[in-house]
Amino acid sequence: MLGIYGKYGVYLGCLWVLNGTPTPVYVSAAFNLYLNYDGNGGKFGAASVAETDSDTVNSSAYASVDTTNALHLVVLNKSYTASADLTFQIGGSTTYSSAQVYAFDANGSAITLRAPAAISNNQFTYTLPPLTAAHFFLPAALSSPAISSQPVSQTSTLGNNVVYSVTASGNPLPTYQWQRQASGSATWTNLGDNATYSGSPTASLTVNSVAATMNGDSFRCVITNSSGTITTSPASLIVETPLTVVTLAGLAGISNATDGAGSAARFANPADLAVDAAGNLYVADAGNHTVRKVTPAGVVTTFAGQAGVSGSSDGSSTAAFNHPTGVAIDSTGNVYVADTNNNEIRKVTAAGVVSTLAGVAGVSGSTDGTGTAASFNGPSGIAVDTTGNLYVSDTLNHTLRKVTSAGVVTTIAGVPGGSGLVDGTGSIAQFHGPQGLALDTRGNLFVADTNNNAIRKVVIVSGVVTTVAGQTGIAGSSDGANSQAQFHYPSGVAVDPAGNLYVADTENHTLREIESSGSVSTLAGLAGVSGSADGAGTAARFNFPTGVTINGTSVVYVADTNNHTIRFVGTTVAPTIAVQPQSQTATAGANVTFFVTASGSPAPTYQWKCNGTMITGAISSSYSLASAQSGNAGNYNVVISNAIGSVTSNAATLTVNAVSPPPNSGANSSGGGGGGAPSVWFYCLLSLLALARRVPQRNSSHVVSQIIAKLGLRTWLVERHWYDPHLELQTARSSKLGTTCRKHSSPSSA
């Protein structure tokens, strides 16, 4: 019986017993069939490959490849009497054209070269005599490397690992060398394995714990064998820094209506927000029944409404809202409000004047019409397009409404009172408690379809409604492809210029992103865990966020409703000073302004100080003093702060000089006076002369003399012409100060 095995690098040739007599010589022949089949050290390949045998009773087969990609087959015909007609079918991408056959059999243990086999399309047949062991050697045709799949560019968040892979073939088997091109460089550098890179000489390169400095780097692989070299296309690496969440305004867990900066301000269940071109936020402060304004630096003021007073009055200081939950702003600064409990759509001008655009306070319904002829039922989301048309999520009617600038209301999608999740056109479509809305630049309206746990899209021109992301009626927090992702009562949605959506996933306490490419990810917060912690990515916490907006492409703002705060989500940078305030010298009475140029993210606040004491109300990047006096002299600096940190400017010294006294013209000077600006005495004299003209002639000299005497002066009336007196003024010390205007003795006098 013949037994011969080769597996996992262990070779065993069992003792052959022929006609009842052991034949030990076949043991060494069996080993040599693996280790020296050709007498020149030819070996069975080191890499085993899969093999299937249709007749394991009469035959056995083993397969491997070596470093030259040559295929090795060891095949046994175990039959004592019958030859084996074998058919070989070879899979894989390597092409073979012929096979060399080395074998021994029952007639002798010497390994001899047998007839070769011709191969066509990687298939051949061969006949082995009874009790024969054969080694088929199939050399692969030499070929230069060829790439069947290129490495793919990667996007990763800071600290994660990324893998670049290539698939290539060639004979002999090629080698690999990965290279890196640093961002901004034109040079490619060979990589070696270290703490940062692993697999640099293989078909797969791992970049470990990517750093921000790698952003923009590119990677490629040089593939080589004795027949040639080929280089892959470069694949880039984009490193995204996790967005950081900081509290811009309000204090977590404390509700009130206080205006102020940062944590000194208070909100009560802020529900929605919108941003204007200057970066100011307008907040529907639902629990306070007001609309608030928040600067980029977090300074909060009440824009419209009366804190704690619900109502429906129009006007400015007397205007009132009733639990507003939606807000939008147009390009001219008009703010539009979904006044939820009033069932109205309100307009607030940039000057703060409130009017009702559509609906009737306290009247719910679904009637289309103009102004007060229309009705709503709990409207909560609102968006405005570039032409002034409003789009309203009429939440309790489960519909979307359009309101023109003239107050004409129509229903554009959904059926009043008919909740569901149906895609379709116009009234065929169905929603279930829609809330937040966002418009992109292509005329698409995105809807946070809250009770359906889905994000929907409406093509405004056609009214066609589709589901963008989420699974119908299934609440969850899964990221992934749009159709596989899950949400849990999403209430707010915003869209950036690239078409990426940002979702306030309310009951997951997270901020989600739906990329325009069709995948959903969690940007900040941890699903199912509420809190108020600031931090990056999953380290941050929200508490039932309901509103979201985006300032261009850089900063997302969230109305963190149950925390009573407004949150900033973006790249944070501590304040830095580019231009320091400068020391100044001024004359008493002059105006003085100090300037500082600084930056930071979020936008910083400013607090000026004089000699270390805060100056009340000095909270901008400049500080002005009107009519500076000696008491204003001192050292001025400014503290610049944001949620990340603060920096204090250098001190700028203000020196205030006293006003110089008027010059003394001298005791012997003549009366005309020289050039230059008139003195204060000149103006006093003109006033005296004007007074003299109003006094009767007989009293004029006396009156003028009395007034001049009170000034410590004495006068001589040089010429007593009433219409044009010529006076010389002298001090009590007989020092002449000057003379008045020239004499007019007659109209023709020069």
Image (cartoon, helix red, strand yellow):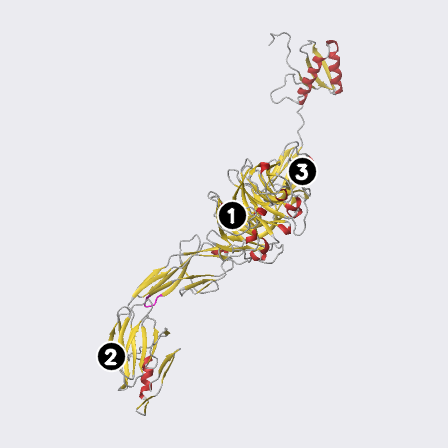
Q: Residue 523, relative to residue 685: is it above or below? A: below
Q: Residue 746, relative to residue 503: is it above or below? A: above
Which of the two discs, 3 and 2, sits closer to the camera? 2
Numbered label tally = 3
Taking 59 as reference, is 363 left or right? right
Mark 2 neighbour class, 10 Å CA radius: few under 14, some 14 to 19, many 20 or more:
some
Q: Name which quarter of the figure residue 298 lies in.
A: top right
Taking 424 as reference, is 607 left or right? right
Which of the two discs, 3 and 1, sits closer to the camera? 1
How far apart marks 3 and 1 lie (CA) works out to 58 Å
Q: Which range is magenta?
A: 170-174
Q: Residue 55, relative to residue 283: is it above or below? A: below
> Pointer 3 and pointer 2: residues touching (CB < 8 Å)?
no
| Residue type marked 2 | Arg
| Residue type marked 3 | Ala
- Considering depth in this image, is 185 or 43 the residue closer to the camera? 43
Question: Residue 42 in the image: x percent, y percent?
Answer: 31, 77
